Image (cartoon, rainbow, N blue to C red):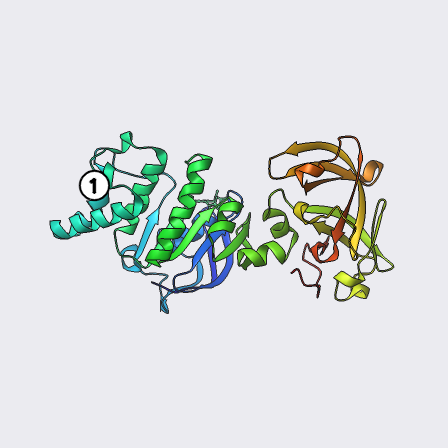
Amino acid sequence: MAQLLFKDVNKVYPNGYHAVHDFNMEIKDGEFICLVGDSGCGKSTTLRMIAGLEDITAGEFYIDGKLANQMSSRDRGIAMVFQSYALYPHLTVYENLAFGLTLEGIDADIIEEKVQATAKILGLTDYLERFPRALSGGQCQRVAVGRALIRKVNIFLMDEPLSNLDAKQRVTMRSEIKQIHRSVGATTIYVTHDQTEAMTMSDRIVVMKSGGYVQQIGTPYELYFYPQNLFVAGFIGEPPMNFIRGTVEGGKFTASGLSFDIKPIVKDVKAIEGKKVVFAFRPEAIKIDAQKDGYVVTSDVELTELLGDTTNVYATVGEGEENVNIILKVNPHHTPEVGAKFKFYIPQNAAYLFDAETEQVIESDISRH
Ligand code: ADP
């Protein structure tokens, strides 16, 4: 197992593109970390710097307290699983699993033992004599994970390992990878653009934005309930958080047709008087029963989607030009009619304010619990 430390790590590619800016983080022994963000935000670059496949342009990277900037890939104690499984097509599952160990010159009976043990963990025992072409996508992915797992390493790196699988297989593999992590305990860095994957698997998540800027590092709980800026607020959660732009006038959030007393939800309302702000709330946080401390909103229903356990309601608030689209999640038994007015309440502890200019959250003392 290994502890990792990044100090102002930067990556500038030879063509001058600055792909990662001042990456700072300490990763504890055995942690499961997801790097998440849209395509091109620098996730793979960061992973490849950890693996030693890309040089670090500036800053320091430590493994277990040892400066590792110049350490060779082989000495880092790393195994990597790629998006493309990179299996050898002409080798059986057994041979694919055994390949690295054979190269290292390990005794055949020890290899046999390790292959069998790894195959058992991954449910591949019955497939050891098959070739990759005779396996499903999920089974190929398991062999790829198995190849990494069979070598006793301290750090597991995974780059979008599930993106070639269908939705159902992804859910199954997600929990399998978590279980493997629990039993193996290796420090794991997992790259994905899928926020659900990140939320369900991680101890902590690093949210990155295009240009290679870290937006926030935190547990899934922290990112969901305490987003530090608009980017994270909009990235985490599905459907995304609702944003209504307005201004603070006389201690009230004011937008077309809306006026909310925001004193209870911000630390220092005077400091934001006159400012342009964004009022935000999650689709699933609304209530249809009157709330003692809730903001009351009347919306116009445009479309509803019954998903089974919930209904997504697409609605608008405000008038004319300043009309804002919002999404609400409601109990399917209380699905409103399209074209009707729909009144709902936003509990104060589910309401957020962001500075429209800096995009940072406006400090609040309110407990989200
Ligand atoms: P992600 O994994 O988040 O999709 P990457 O780390 O692969 O993003 O890439 C980050 C940015 O760096 C992208 O804009 C990409 O085009 C650029 N990039 C990646 N590799 C190179 C390279 N070898 N030379 C120049 N730019 C690169």
Residue indicated by mark 1: 94
Q: Nearer the viewer, residue 13 or 25?
A: 25
Residue type at numbered disc 1: Tyr
- Asked whether residue 48 appears in the rendered view, the answer is no
Q: Is residue 348 left or right of residue 102?
A: right
Residue at point 74%, 57% (across, down): 348
Name above or below for residue 77 compared with residue 89. Answer: below
Farthest right residue in view: 250
Bin the neighbour count of mark 1 within 10 Å (Cα to Cα): few under 14, some 14-19, many 20 and up. Answer: many
Taking the spot 30% from the left edge, 58% from the top edge, the residue there is 77
Quadrant housing the N terminus: bottom left
Estimate the x, y position of residue 227 in percent, counting from the top left. Answer: 62, 56
Give the quarter of the figure containing the C terminus.
bottom right
Query: Do we see residue 140 in this rendering?
Result: yes
Residue 267, how many percent across, how many down? 74, 66
Question: Which secondary structure, mark 1?
Answer: helix
Q: In this view, does 260 lie to the left or right of 196?
A: right
Residue situated in front as seen by the camera: 121 or 271:
121
Identify which residue, 47 or 181, lies in the foreground. Answer: 181
Disc 1 CB within 8 Å of nearest ligand 1 atom = no
Is 319 or 225 nearer to us in this picture?
225
Picture coordinates of residue 337, whole percent (x, y): 75, 32
State the residue at coordinates (36%, 34%): 137
In percent of width and height, residue 86 lies at: 31, 39
**Total numbered labels:** 1
Specify the farthest residue to the bottom: 65
Residue 35 lies left or right of residue 315; in this view the side is left
Quadrant position of residue 292: bottom right
